[in-house]
Amino acid sequence: MTAAPPTLKYLNGYPPHLLADVRRMLDEGRLGSTLRQRYPQAHEVRTDGALYDYVAALKARHMRNAGQISKVGYDNRLRVIQHALGTHTTVSRVQGDKLKAKREIRVASLFRDAPAPFLKMIVVHELAHLKEREHDKPFYALCTHMEPDYHQLEFDLRLWLTARDVEGAEAGRAGPDEDS
Ligand SMILES: [Zn+2]
């Protein structure tokens, strides 16, 4: 594979001037390092059990009345895929099985190694889906209620995913674990 222009697939829908900034930082090789400086803190949610506790604590604080969650875990088969909505990337997924009224929150395994604020953003996003299915105003109101910096974190998370893809491709040439 020859070096292709970096893909900004995680940033669909963001304004062109922002994308130009991102491209310049990628060209200069400083997107990843900038994000590491801005978000130095790792988290210690390493296991499915720890993730369950983490989700349960946030839910108890903000969404006590939402339906029960039957299962929480990291999933290394879960790919970071784009939503049909265009501006949204699903980085984890809620599966609602209406027949059994069970909810499952799965978080892509790559977020084990993400900065702590990004894990919170992901979990907040998925908790909000317990009540709001679409990415609409009520949905984002719930997200910002749980995490006031939600929008900034979502944007920076997209930058992090972008940097991870580009740096991964440069370092190993195999690309990250996202092939079909
Ligand atoms: Zn979503």
Image: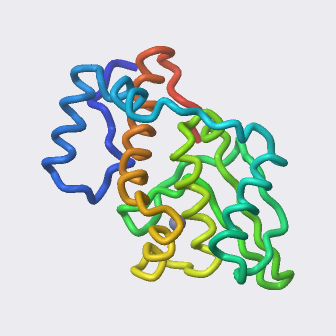
Q: Which residue is drawn at 72% across and 75% down?
A: 96
Q: In this view, does 116 lie above or below 142?
A: above
Q: Where is residue 119 in the image (x, y as percent from the top left)?
A: 58, 48
Q: Is residue 70 left or right of residue 77?
A: right
Query: Quadrant location of the C terminus?
Result: top right
- Colour scheme of the rendered structure: rainbow
- Residue plotted at (61% across, 38% down): 110
Quarter holding residue 122: bottom right
Considering every residue shown, the one lying at the far top of the view is 171
Residue 173 location (% of width, % of height): 47, 17
Question: 150 or 166, which lies in front?
Answer: 150
**Most extreme residue toward the front, as rendered?**
61
What residue is shown at x 38% (from left), y 33% (from top)? 38
Q: Where is residue 32 in the image (x, y as percent from the top left)?
A: 38, 27
- Camera-side residue: 117 or 102? 117
Question: In the image, 133: left or right of 95?
Answer: left
| Rendered location of residue 31, percent (x, y) | 32, 29
Frontmost residue, 128 versus 83:
128
Q: In this view, does 173 lie to the left or right of 7?
A: right
Q: How many labels does the image show?
A: 0
Front-most of 179 and 162?
Answer: 162
Q: Quadrant of the N terminus?
A: top left
